[in-house]
Image (spheres, rainbow, N blue to C red):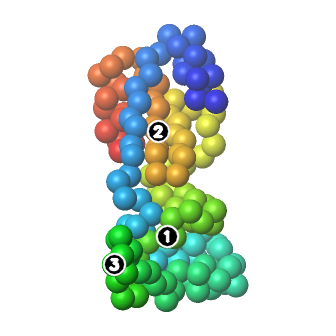
């Protein structure tokens, strides 16, 4: 998908500039109240965001190292590692990093995300123009 977009822009004699973002510690850093706020802002039905809120409430864990097992403690933030739902919730949480709208050959900007990786591409007539436009997007 992105390679087709890039080749199309090259055929238009434009240069393509890209930024590649990798969010460090993505899942553990998700703030539950912010996620619920974003879901409400994206018109998520109340029954669904209430289920998600419950899914992320009263989570606990224990640490095990060799023979040592810690006492159980609360995990107040983050998404559960390994849960298929966490992938979807993180993409919704991270959606503000994306350029709005679907990729289009008519547009000179596009972005794509996969879990905690976000790629922004911008096509321009010159490097100077591209850098100026990229500054506006980011």
Among the two numbered marks 1 and 2 on one chain, the one whose residue lies closer to the N terminus? 1
Residue 129 sits above or below residue 119 on the image = above
Circle 2 residues within 10 Å: few <14, some 14–19, many ≥20: some
Please give the name of the residue rendered at 62% of the width and 85% of the height, measured from the top-left corner.
Answer: 50
Q: Nearer the viewer, mark 1 or mark 2?
A: 1
The part of the image, by quadrant, that contains residue 24 is bottom left
Circle 1 residues within 10 Å: few <14, some 14–19, many ≥20: many
Please give the name of the residue rendered at 36% of the width and 26% of the height, measured from the top-left corner.
Answer: 130
Mark number for residue 126? none
For label 3, the residue is: 68
Secondary structure type for disc 2: strand
Residue 109: % across, % down: 50, 34
For label 2, the residue is: 119
Q: Nearer the viewer, mark 3 or mark 2?
A: 3
Q: Find the distance from the CA under tag 3 to the CA under tag 2.
A: 42 Å
Q: Find the distance from the CA under tag 1 to the CA under tag 2.
A: 22 Å
Residue 34: % across, % down: 44, 75
Mark number for residue 79? 1
């Amino acid at each position: 998908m992105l390679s087709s977009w890039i080749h199309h822009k090259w055929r238009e004699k434009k240069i393509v500039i890209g930024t590649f973002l990798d969010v460090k510690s993505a899942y553990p850093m998700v703030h539950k109240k912010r996620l619920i706020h974003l879901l409400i802002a994206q018109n998520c039905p109340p029954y669904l965001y209430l289920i998600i809120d419950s899914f992320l409430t009263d989570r606990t864990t224990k640490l095990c190292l060799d023979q040592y097992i810690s006492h159980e403690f609360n995990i107040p933030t983050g998404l559960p590692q390994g849960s298929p739902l966490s992938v979807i919730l993180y993409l919704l949480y991270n959606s503000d990093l994306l350029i709005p709208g679907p990729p289009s050959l008519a547009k000179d900007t596009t972005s794509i995300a996969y879990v905690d990786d976000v790629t922004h591409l911008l096509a321009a007539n010159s490097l100077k123009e591209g850098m100026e436009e990229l500054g506006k997007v980011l």
